[in-house]
Image (cartoon, rainbow, N blue to C red):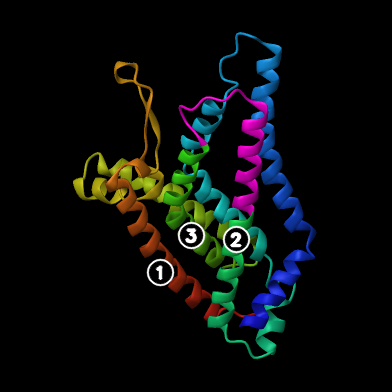
Amino acid sequence: MFNYIKSEFYRLSRSMSTYVTLAIFAALSLIINLGLAIVGWAERSFVYNNTSFSMMFLLQLPSIFVYAAAIIAYIVYEGNRRNGNLKNAVAFGISREKLFIGQFIVSLVSALVVLFVTEGVYFASAYALLRNDAAFTAADVLLETAAALPVAIASLVLALACAHISDRGFVGLLIWIAVFLILPWICGLIGLKVQIFSEIAAWMPMNFMTATIDGNEGSGAMVAYWQQQEGIIKALVFGGAGTVIFGLSGWLIFKRKEV
């Protein structure tokens, strides 16, 4: 399995899609802060060209880490069966269990690299281009990132499993959307009438990973799941349970699928 992982990292290092993906994420980070800076330079009355607003932008989008993890896993392994990589690995005697674990490790490391680079570019561009304001800082974003990691990993595992469901990439994508977006919405809707569904919906990431600004008495304080013990517990429980359940599902799919 170790040789398979090394070969996968070598494949990714030689793939143009790897660098294009990394460049897109980094460019988007730069564009956000550059846009704020340009508007601030052009319009003196613009009050949002500061680091606090830039950080608050990310703090209000905790689910972005969940989406990004799924995108990375899908980019790395969607179509892996079509290009013959799996067939070659199986032919060399690597068990499907080890293949799936290896793909998870490669996807996770790839996602972490993209995360580090993207946040590095975001922080550097924010503090270089914008006025410094300490209301919200990079430290807050890092705390949010750490809290989101368990759910993001579960999202990555599900995306990896979905990538092997069908040769048609959109089929797996629809399944991920159904699990992470549609199902929480349906449970929340039914929960308005049935209490048990309301309780189930409250444990789904897209329902509890919501950051808002507290307007009471003009405090402007951030109210986020990662700042509350209950929210952290939900993230850890869903992340752990989701990783196991999605991982087992992916392994079963991978085990029975023809390569």
In x, y percent, where is residue 255?
Answer: 53, 81
Q: Secondary structure at mark 3?
A: helix
Tell me the distance, in whole angstroms, between the alpha carbons under discs 1 and 2. 17 Å
Residues under labels 2 and 3: Cα distance? 10 Å
In the picture of the structure, the residue carrying the numbered disc 2 is 73
Q: Which residues are magenta?
A: 114-137
Name the residue located 53 percent from the left edge and 26 percent from the top edge: 53
Residue 97 x, y percent position in the rendering: 53, 82
Asked if the residue under mark 2 is in contact with the one under mark 1, i.e. CB atoms within 8 Å, the reply is: no
Residue 259 in percent (x, y) is at: 65, 79
Lateral position of residue 231 relative to residue 125, left or right: left
Identify residue type, mark 3.
Ile
Q: Residue most toward the top?
A: 45
Q: Quadrant of residue 83?
A: bottom right
Q: Label 3 belongs to which residue? A: 153
**Mark closer to the chain start, 1 or 3:** 3
Q: Residue at x 55, y 55 (%)?
A: 69
Q: Residue at x 76, y 65 (%)?
A: 13
Residue 185 visible (yes or no) = no
Residue under label 1: 244
Is 116 within the magenta?
yes
Q: Amino acid at mark 2?
A: Ala
Q: Position of residue 163 (x, y in %)?
A: 59, 64
Viewer-side residue, 252 vs 129? 129
Mark 2 or mark 3: whose residue is earlier in sequence:
2
Around disc 1, counting alpha carbons within 10 Å, would you say few (fewer than 14), some (14 to 19), or many (20 or more)? some
Query: Could you tell me the amino acid type at mark 1?
Result: Val
